[in-house]
Amino acid sequence: MQVRATDQILHKAAWLYYTHGLRQDEVAARLNISRASVAAYLRRARETGIVNISTSTQLFADDMLARELEDALGLTSAWIVPEDRHAMDPTAEMPVVAAAVFLELIGKGDRVGVAWGRTVYHLADVMPFADLQGVTVMQLCGNLGAPYSYRPDQCTTEIARRLNAEGINIYAPLVLSSRELADALRAEPVVSEQLTTISSCQLALYSVGGIEADSHLVKCGALSAEAMHALGQAGAAGVIAGQIIDANGQWLDCDHNRRCISADLESIRAIGKRMMVVQEDSKFEPLVAAVRGGFASHLVVTTSMARRLLQRWTRDGHVGNATS
């Protein structure tokens, strides 16, 4: 359903009031209209059936910038979270929009692969409860130490709980102490089956990690800051499901990756709907690498990030390759 320009304010009012829980006077102040107008818009939204997450997310897709981004990068769909004065704080808006989009993309009986990190964790935290029995939520990679926040098992379990779906965790560390031990664990029937079935997922949800000194892999102790710096010198550009990728989005042949318990990157690329959510400006180069590597078919980004991506693709003359 296309949202006409004249209906944009109606959808914004409904989104702010019903999804973010703002009072009518707060919505009026945000949109610079009267409280009476807000009440009228909300009444019309109820009467026309606009009051639902599915339609409201059209606000973030029905935008010329989103269309340009899809065409340039070869995406199936893009959602743009605005940063203008009428918008919510992107740090608050992004997980809400992404959670709504994620729910839209899930089909009956789907298998859903989930990675980890702050973005995925916050998305899970704001996701509304839904009764999606028959859906299976699978962990894409091994686990991290207990003290670390945003662990893979936490993200998978919470999303499965919110969906009333079956959750399947990988009960193995993300990184082993040696290649030999990692090879042996990957060969174990239970772990092998879990990793093999990931390619049968219909939907994957993740962000892309950076390679800076305070990245998740460094913070969780999987890599030292020095080792991460060395990987950057060797061509590392980002992190997908715990694995290092280069600037073209390809698996980097390095000791870390060979000690990693995670879905094969080709298995992830084989998933039809690959939903990537990126908010931080610092994730720009990792995002470029991930898109080049075909890890995003559905993308949720801010307006400024979308514009930077378009500028990069125009400058470099890329051909869109994100679709399956």
Image (cartoon, rainbow, N blue to C red):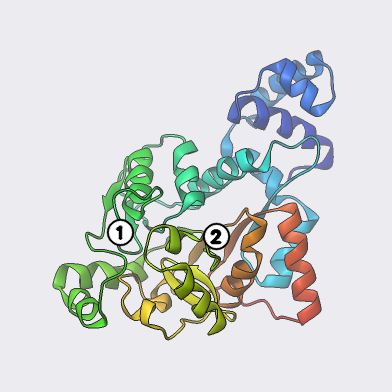
Would residue 68 be visible to someone looking at this image? no
Residue 46 as seen in the image, left or right of residue 210: right
Q: Position of residue 22 (x, y in %)?
A: 65, 22
Q: Residue at x 76, y 64 (%)?
A: 308
Report the Cα–Cα distance between label 1 and label 2.
Answer: 20 Å
Give the total number of marks visible in the rendering.
Answer: 2
Q: Residue at x 66, y 72 (%)?
A: 74
Kindly identify the amino acid type of the residue bearing the numbered disc 1.
Answer: Asn
Residue highlighted by disc 1? 143
Would residue 256 be visible to someone looking at this image? yes
Residue 219 as seen in the image, left or right of residue 176: right
Residue highlighted by disc 2? 276
Q: Residue at x 72, y 28 (%)?
A: 13
Q: Position of residue 139 (x, y in %)?
A: 33, 58
Q: Position of residue 64 (x, y in %)?
A: 80, 56
The image quadrant that residue 284 belongs to is bottom right
Q: Position of residue 307 (x, y in %)?
A: 78, 61
Q: Nearer the viewer, residue 259 or 208?
A: 259
Q: Residue furthest left?
A: 189
For the residue labelled by badge 2, is the local secondary structure a helix, a strand or a loop? strand
For the residue labelled by badge 1, is the local secondary structure a helix, a strand or a loop? loop
Q: Residues within 10 Å of mark 2 (few under 14, many from 20)?
A: many
The image quadrant that residue 259 belongs to is bottom left
Q: Could you tell which of marks 1 and 2 lies nearer the N-terminus?
A: 1
Kindly identify the amino acid type of the residue bearing the numbered disc 2.
Answer: Met
The image quadrant that residue 16 belongs to is top right
Q: Residue furthest top?
A: 36
Vertical relation: 135 (above or below) 272: above
Q: Residue at x 49, y 69 (%)?
A: 239
